[in-house]
Amino acid sequence: MKLYVPLDSAAKALGADEVAAALVAEAEKQGIAVEITRTGSRGMIWLEPLVEIEENGTRMGFGTATPEDAAAILAGTSDKALGPVEELDWMKRQDRLTFARVGVIDPLDLADYEAHGGLAGLRRALGMTGQEIVDEVKASGLRGRGGAGFPTGIKWQTVHDADAPQKYIVCNADEGDSGTFADRMIMEGDPFTLIEGMAIAGLAVGATRGYVYLRSEYPDAIAIMSRAVEIARSRGLLGADVMGSGRAFDMEIRKGAGAYVCGEETSLLNSLEGKRGVVRAKPPLPALEGFLGRPTVVNNVISLATVPVIFEKGAQAYADLGMGRSRGTVTLQIAGNVARGGLFETAFGLSLGEVVNDLGGGTMTGRPVKAAQVGGPLGAYLPVSKFDAPLGYEELDAEGGLLGHAGIVIFDDATDMLEMARFAMEFCAVESCGKCTPCRIGAVRGVETIDRIAQGDGDALPLLTDLCEVMKEGSLCALGGFTPLPVMSAVTHFPDDFAHGKEAAE
């Protein structure tokens, strides 16, 4: 009997290890021969731990499983039975490309990876010139999935054209935004796709070294990625002779120390070099003077993990998905006060309302939805009146929002948006690297000003607006520059929450 139990951090936090142990113990008790494969998560976090049993090539799901369910699951009589996993509505409605193997394969089984389409993209890229690889990425329309949405192919072209004795590929795996977990899920569930994507990037621009900057708060991802790199190197996918091509690319995992600002690429590069993680002034761009002063591609995990899909299926097949200038798929991470939280990969274009109400099922509390914050702690709080907005970079920007890393955190009508605005300012104050005054001092003054408003000082509201403008225009990076977005969106869309302090004082 073949069983599959996730080793994903979220599933483990919900008891997946205990469920796996119970299944083994029960099988031994009943004299049943079982083979348990630990996989990544399918992304249906509300169903974790999700146990799957293979029957005639079809994987049948059982969730939310507990150790007490082991006997009934093995007997096929459990009331937790969900039917064929691939036929569940959540799975059927997705365009799973980047996450096609996550939850399906053993993440450290290279043969399993290859049997499910892995390495096809790298093999194709090895037969192409660097410029041809760059052109393919340009044609796909792939943009940075880490937040800014910058066209990946243009960044690669800049590094390709740079003249230098050494170039680098750096993967930004410092996934610090609240409500985001796609990077972690791909690294824990399909690490070889990230390795393959980085190798293709190296071939494209002429880089022979790569680094994954991985946040220390992800110990499971660190362990799995480190082991995957060792396996890839031992099998000839990394090193001086990639897959017998005579072309070199090798990489290693570097652990960050927990600074949110190191998600900004120049701060990340300083940290990677062993320096204090503070933002660099630009220019020069990292594409020209990045790691150790050399031309460097800095891309997000999902951006690089998507590259093998583009080379396996072709740039046009990828570009055919999406809307406007947002091509391909977006990995939506649905979290917060929501009935069905998890990861959902789909073509750009779903409306925010569809995601919150249809996929997410509304709030977990059953109260009406009040707002959704899209794009992490620097994203706007969008009211229900904005829920018709389609999830695309330019489309959401036109509504005053920020797609960012596509994390969506949901709040019900009991939420005080003044408190959420204060949280945004306090987050900036705590996480500021201190390099520039508008961020370092402005965020502290912002907390104080919001506290004045809460105490009934209505005259402080124009001051908050002016302060946000200074932070937006004067900060060196997005931390200080985008913090005004959640603050002012709360002020603009939920004015009543900023009036109650004054009313209480009166």
Image (cartoon, rainbow, N blue to C red):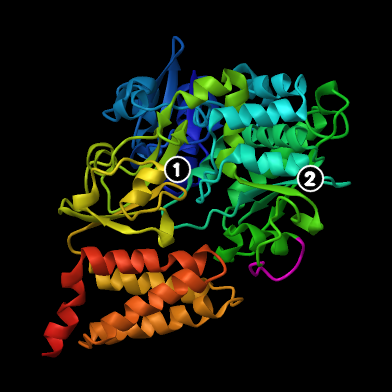
Is residue 203 visible in the rendered image? The answer is yes
Q: Which residues are magenta?
A: 273-280
The amino acid sitting under disc 2 is Ala
State the residue at coordinates (55%, 36%): 189
Identified by mark 1, the residue type is Ala
User: Spatial distance from mark 2 to mark 1, Cα to Cα?
Assistant: 44 Å
Q: Quadrant of residue 292?
A: bottom right
Q: Main secondary structure of the magenta part?
A: loop
Q: Point out the image quarter for the C terminus.
A: bottom left
- The residue where tag 2 is placed is 162
Q: Quadrant of residue 427?
A: bottom left
In the picture, measured across the screen, residue 16 lies left or right of residue 489, that is right
Image quarter of residue 230 = top right
- In the rendered image, residue 26, in percent from the top left (x then y), is placed at 45, 30
Provide the residue designation for mark 1: 11
Q: Residue furthest top?
A: 56
| SS label for mark 2 | loop
Disc 2 versus disc 1: nearer the observer = 2
Which of the two labelled residues, at mark 2 and mark 1, occupies the earlier sequence position?
1
User: Is 73 situated above or below 217?
Assistant: above
**Frontmost residue, 2 versus 183:** 183
Q: Secondary structure at mark 1?
A: helix
